[in-house]
Image (tube, helix red, strand yellow):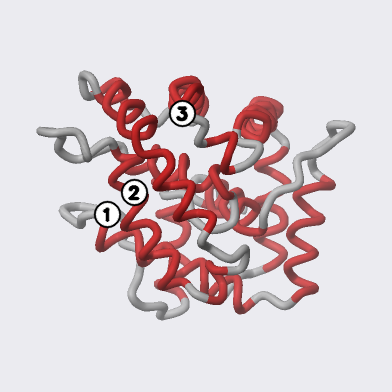
Amino acid sequence: MLDLDVAEQAIRLCNAGIEFRAADRLMHHHFASPEAALSPSSIAERVVLLDGLWATQMFWKAGQVARVIETLTQHAHIILRTCRSLHATALEASPAEVVESARVCMPIALGTLVAGAKGGPYSFATKFLHWTTRCHFPIMDSRARAAINRLQRNNAFRPRIPSNTGDLHWTEDYPRWVCFYSELIRSLSPGHRERLLTADLESQPEPVPCANSLLRVLDKAFYTLGTTAV
């Protein structure tokens, strides 16, 4: 499905922004491991950091940030236990396990376990879960959504990630993201994977570039392709 030349160019273009690279380095530092990401004593700082860096705009709903912090702090141990149960290659080899893990973890990251809470910051929740392990949970983003939907339509891929969520609940939408990335990663040869990972490292001019998962590198490609004709 994936044009490697286009994907590599998009990754390099994404990393060309010094602000973007700085944000990535901050995430690597503050989400150094699942244990660090889910330390209850400092979850509030990571929620605020992620929301600010990636403009997930939780401020639009009064009290939403506080609800998310509360549920993550109280139930971090559930997410940690669930993430520890996933093999490093689960997204590629056992996508159903990732979907089931998301069904456990997503309501916590959405802050919807608090009584009376409705909806939740879907994009934020996927980003928080992604950075917790970096190799299991795809990031849901409107830019990536546009690029992936276009790729899927061009390749007759079903079920597709819709161009917009509309009334689709995350429990219906997010499994499609997991399915797409699982099939895409399986389709990439070891050489193709190495090419994308190398492009990501080579396009970070810092003395110590961030070593990203293949999932994160692919997200960079789709994030860029969602707004740029590469």
Question: Vertically, is 82 above or below 99?
Answer: above
What is the C-alpha distance between the residues marked 2 and 3? Answer: 17 Å
Q: Is residue 113 above or below residue 187?
A: above
At horizontal 72% and vertical 57% (from top left) the residue drawn is 8
The part of the image, by quadrant, that contains residue 72 is top left
Q: Toward which corner of the image does residue 55 lie, by quadrant?
A: top left
- Mark 2, mark 3: which one is toward the viewer? 3
* Tag 3 residue: 40
User: Which element carries disc 1, helix, strand or loop?
Assistant: helix
Q: At label 3, which amino acid type do we have?
A: Pro
Q: Which residue is mark 1?
A: 170
The percent coordinates of residue 188 (x first, y second) are: 67, 75
Front in this rendered view, residue 69 or 180: 69
Q: Which residue is mark 2?
A: 106
| Marks 1 and 2, how far apart at CA | 9 Å
- Which mark's residue is nearer the viewer, 3 or 1? 3
